[in-house]
Amino acid sequence: MISPEYPDTYWSFRHALKFISKKAINPPLGLLTIAAMLPPHWEKKVVDLNVTSLREKDIMEADYVLISAMSVQSASVSRVIEVSKIHGTKIIAGGPMFTGDPDSYLHLDHLILNEAEITLPQFLSDLEKGCPRQVYSTDAFADLSLSPTPDYSLIDISDYAQLNLQYSRGCPFDCEFCEITSLLGRKVRTKSSDQILGELDTIYRTGYRGNLFLVDDNFIGNRHKLKKDLLPAMSRWNDLHGSPFTFTTEASIDLADDPELMHRMVDVGFEKVFVGIETVEQESLAECNKAHNMDRDLTESVRKIQSAGIEVSAGFIVGFDSDTPGVFQRQINFIQQTGIITAMVGLLNAPNRTRLYQRLWKEGRIHEGFDGNNTNNSMNFTPKMEQEKLLAGFKSINQTIYSSRVYYERLKQFLGRFQPGVKASRRKTGDQVMAFVRSVYYIGILSRDRIHYWKLFIWSLLYKPKMFPLAITYSIYGYHFRKVYQIR
């Protein structure tokens, strides 16, 4: 089972990982889940190319190579396929990349598309009978009670900065640019609280302590069930186990409208949420059908979440048809004013399962070749704004918000008013000392940005000593972002 390599992007945090001697942020949760669904007598091996190199010996010894990937991993996927073909090893492929564009991979032996809880058992049954088909797909959505606990025994957990798990699939919203609803539907399906507690037990037994990322596309999609079922169950589990984990997840901005939910999340140990802000332009929000972000004070919504003690990271997009040349500075202003430290600003692209793709195709504006990386300079359609002007504006946002002076100014502003809801004593990050020492060396001594680092260092110790670990963490993040965006 091969997890292809991710390129060096915003999300890789590759330049930050060296501070804590980790090789990747997250393990390949999809493959670990698939592994638990395979026959127990099969000999299984996970090769994560983000933590190790591909050995031809592994390909040669295997009966099958299983690949799961997203579009951003396409270059690495091509290399894996090439090596497997050279050695005549059969390939089984699945995951979002292959489900989104199966016609481009009909040269592979087997495509297990959509959700594996449905299509994988069909393939395994046919394989046992000696008559496996090439393509397995379905229009149905899986019952998550059938989803097994991921097999974490197949990885070395010390390679990863955090571990991950999944509670729900699907999103109640239908943003034009997003392929979540086409892949996973608008009905939010969840695992039971017993399943999640079982997964927490499994991770606990590995000896891991630290942050867990719940990878749900919208964790609060069924907030009633969260408040009445999952979060109380997790709270009781924490009491029995001494709160060994903290949590991050993804949620829609309307989390800000529910103080009770935020309080319960903080009580369980949620430290941070990633929120899709996308844009501050009302016309662009209407254009992409992001109705839940409209007609609200987005700055106030972000600050409500922060005031509850939860850090906010966020995604932003430029390139909507409604965008005007003033959008770039307005995005910069919003990010600075809200103190969103990790702000992922991307160019609009149209994955081929989205309503945006369908609309732009009808308008004759689509270019093929979407590589899944929305933080580089690539677009797969012709924008309304002059492309050269759009690319220059996009670059200016990242060059500005991650320049040392502006970044540290935003960080100091955020730390000055933020009060974490999760107690510092629960931040059980054994790598903090190592990260601190290396930050002094790489940023405080070697980096040309060292003056900003030391100013924050001293300010934090004097005025916000409890926030000092977070100040160092975000200094390291800034180092990574400047490397990715080649800011000098």
Image (tube, rainbow, N blue to C red):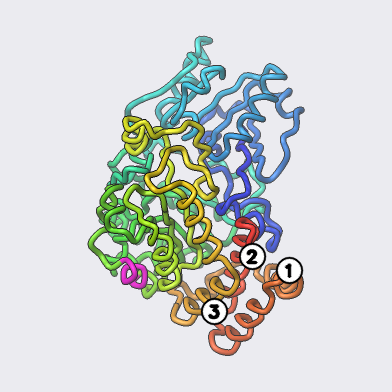
Q: Nearer the viewer, mark 2 or mark 3?
A: 2
Picture layout, residue 214 above or below residue 57: below
The answer to which of 290 and 83 lies nearer the viewer is: 290
Give the SS element for disc 1.
helix
Q: Position of residue 81 (x, y in %)?
A: 63, 25
Q: Nearer the viewer, mark 1 or mark 3?
A: 1
Q: Amino acid at mark 3?
A: Met
Q: Amino acid at mark 1?
A: Tyr
State the mark number for residue 479.
2
Q: Main secondary structure of the magenta part?
A: helix
Reading the chain from its start, which is encountered first: label 2 or label 1?
1
- The disc at residue 442 is 1
The disc at residue 467 is 3
Please report the residue visible at 51 percent of the width from the left and 57 percent of the height from the top: 212
CA–CA distance in space, label 1 to label 3: 21 Å
Q: Left of 254 or right of it: where is 416?
A: right
Quick one: 329 or 375, which is closer to the camera? 329
Mark 2–mark 1 contact, CB under 8 Å? yes
Residue 148, percent from left and from top: 46, 38
Residue at left offset 53%, top offset 47%: 377
- Depth check: 429 or 475 in front? 475
Numbered range of the magenta stretch: 298-304
